[in-house]
Image (cartoon, helix red, strand yellow):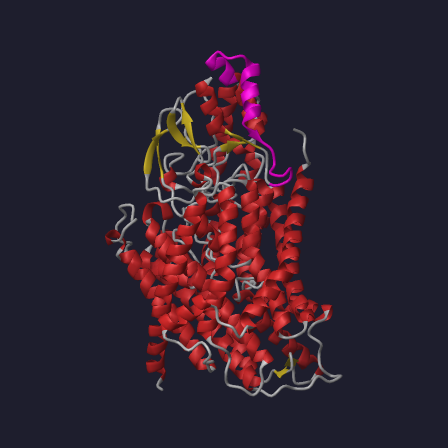
Amino acid sequence: MGGLSDPAAGFLTIAALVAALVLVHAPLGDLMARVYTSSRHLGAERLLYRVAGVDPDAEQRWPVYARAVLGFSLVSVLLLYALQRLQGLLPLSLGFPGVAPPTAWNTAVSFVTNTNWQSYSGESTMGHLVQAAGLAVQNFVSAAVGMAVFVALVRGFTRSRTDRIGSFWVDLVRTCVRILLPLALVAAVVMLLGGVVQNLAGPTAVTTVAGGTQTITGGPIASQEAIKELGTNGGGFFNANSAHPFEGPTAWVSLFQVFLLLVIPFSLPRTFGRLVGDRRHGLAVVGVMGLLWLGSVALAVWAEVAGSGAAPQAAGAAMEGKEVRFGEVLSGLFGASTTATSTGAVNSFHDSFTAAGGGVTILNMMLGEVSPGGTGSGVYGLLVLAVIAVFLAGLMVGRTPELLGKKISRPEVTLVALYVLATPTLLLVGAALTAGVPSLREASLQDSGAHGLSEVLYAYASAANNNGSAFAGFGAATDYQNTALGLAMVFGRFVPMLLVIALAGRLASQAPVPVTAGTLPTHTPLFAGLLTVVVLVVAGLTYFPALALAPIAEALS
Amino acid sequence: MSRVLDLTRQSAAGLRLLLALTLLLGVLYPAVVLGVGQLVPGRANGSMIEVDGRPAGSALLGQAFDGPGWFQPRPSAAGDGYDPQASGASNLGPNNPDLVASIAERRAAVAASDGVDPAAVPADALTASGSGLDPDISPAYAEIQVARVARERGLPVATVEQLVAEHTRGRDLGFIGEPSVDVVTLNAALAGA
């Protein structure tokens, strides 16, 4: 059938994806900006507010906004935990018993924090009801919580002399009803056409072509798959996640999934630009995100196609853990994108990636999930780093730094410094405990040496940054790891989030500073360059020693 | 209002909202997708196939094929091989000595069974997939199996080659992913031939 050469096809794949994102980000970003500034409530939304007993027109001070986020997340964990524990008594459980407490805790926390780390195997643990009414609901609302906090932070910049940063309930409900639900419906239908399964079939034994037996389980997969990518969640219906043919049946469906997991994070900078009244600010942010993402994609795809390492060399290509229909290019592209967006879905298994390719996926998470990061959390993370960038620039010229007309003084810098320290502390302390305590190490590590250390680093990078993918050889299903990784997810999600809400409150209460000739413009390529350097330097200073001992040592050996 | 009291109040509002959203997003939404799926029932139900009028699994899920008369799929790490109840990969690292040893053994075994030079055995024949349920092999791996399958089944080589061509899928839209041969539907066609 002839056809394109491998490099041409790979280049076209990435170019088509970039073109689709460029095309969609403007209308979607503008639409999201209108959703958050509209003064109208839809009928369905009014109904939801009435059920909740909240006044949608009452705005909140930042401590109340923070308590609403925490309260909602707390009941989310409790409800999801209860659903799993009581599974045996519920319909559509497929005969599965209640989930054991350590796994149920880990899974509840994992889905509520938008991490979607999976210490269970979907097809042998979760019935259809828990998947659809428990896990998939958290896929929606945990993504919406991230976007709500982003909007609250933007209000901090756009408002002055007020103690109100918006209503969490309105931000949450509108994100679900007006943004995520319609997009998920369209995406689910597209995937149905591509062969993604949507039924309620329980385990069914069939006689195979050659006369053997196989037990096949279906489920409400397309509906879950759509929001799993769109909400940068990543928790697979099956253990094999998007590599499973019922989740990712064809190459174009898999590429479409990469598009879905990137589309909201890459459109929110446009929303940001709209909300602050100057699209150039959005361009600077998306420029930084795009540069870092494209760099990681190029590295990962190159590493997987080049296929260095003893096993890829012995086999002739790095195909261990990869599907034939996807090949190295689509696998590397998916791997880099899923780790750059805090999604954690996989269409190939990163533990078997080449040392360099696997290293890129770890580095992507260590950047703090800002390239472009998760829904909402990516762009608020990058705005926090922008505060550091103007602070550094201010130090250089000896001026009080400003960002978008707000003074960055000691209280703001303190909040931002704590934000930058929170995740690395969880990551490095958590990884050091597992790597340092012999009994923990032996219980969870599959490979020895540098690759073993990569497995531990990956696990804690993934949990603390709410990514959720894994070097799956790592034995995460022990009581210790279920508990410790669960704690890393909780603190990795809510400590930074609370600091951002507090920052929003501080900024909103300030009077605006007028722009003068001495103000550092924060919408220029120069500032985007400075911000890129800040992202890389902050991550580099924090993680280089650990990376040098793990993937870098492995790649060079 | 005290902070604890307010947190309780917010949690109560959150619980009521969460239950309402569960109905909308966790029941109504998947039900609508389920309804739409019935417009393309074959696909929504897993692209199931039949052999001689009996159900024989899914065209999407790889199966084990014992015996030289079948096209062989890739090695599988799902359970004891191609078990949809235990999907997954080997997760062995790129320098794992056990993996390197398995690859060498598989290369020798395939070369012997298909009567080809060990260097001609492609990578997908030597490595386990991500899902453990990969239904596909590369066209190169199908090609080296044609002579064996034709001989075992007493079919002309040209007939088997024709069947392989019919079950080969190019890159999607000409550029996405890799060319592949669906072993499940190919073997199903052989069973009916």
- Nearest the camera: A263 or B139? A263
- Nearest the camera: A48 or A281? A48
Q: Residue furthest left?
A: A89
Instruction: Tell me where residue A507 appears, x and y as whole percent.
Output: 56, 82
Is residue A217 highlighted in magenta? no
Relative to B109, residue A455 above or below:
below
x 54%, y 20%: residue: B146
- Nearest the camera: A554 or A187? A187
Give the quarter of the figure containing the N terminus of chain A. top right
Relative to B104, residue B94 above or below:
below
x 49%, y 53%: residue: A185
Based on the displayed image, in which of its 4 quarters is residue A48 positioned?
Answer: bottom left
x 62%, y 52%: residue: A297
Based on the displayed image, in which of its 4 quarters is residue A47 positioned?
Answer: bottom left
Instruction: Tell me where residue A374 appears, x and y as whole percent.
Output: 52, 62
Instruction: Tell me where residue B136 appears, x and y as whole percent.
Output: 51, 33
- Residue range (magenta): B148-176
x 59%, y 72%: residue: A383
Residue A81 appears left or right of A296: left
Residue A121 appears left or right of B151: left
Residue B86 visible in the picture: yes
Residue A552 appears left or right of A101: right
Instruction: Tell me where residue B188 appears, x and y as whole percent.
Output: 45, 24
Relative to A246, residue A534 above or below:
below
Residue A299 appears left or right of A208: right
- Nearest the camera: A447 or A488? A488
Is residue B163 highlighted in magenta? yes
Residue A308 visible in the picture: no
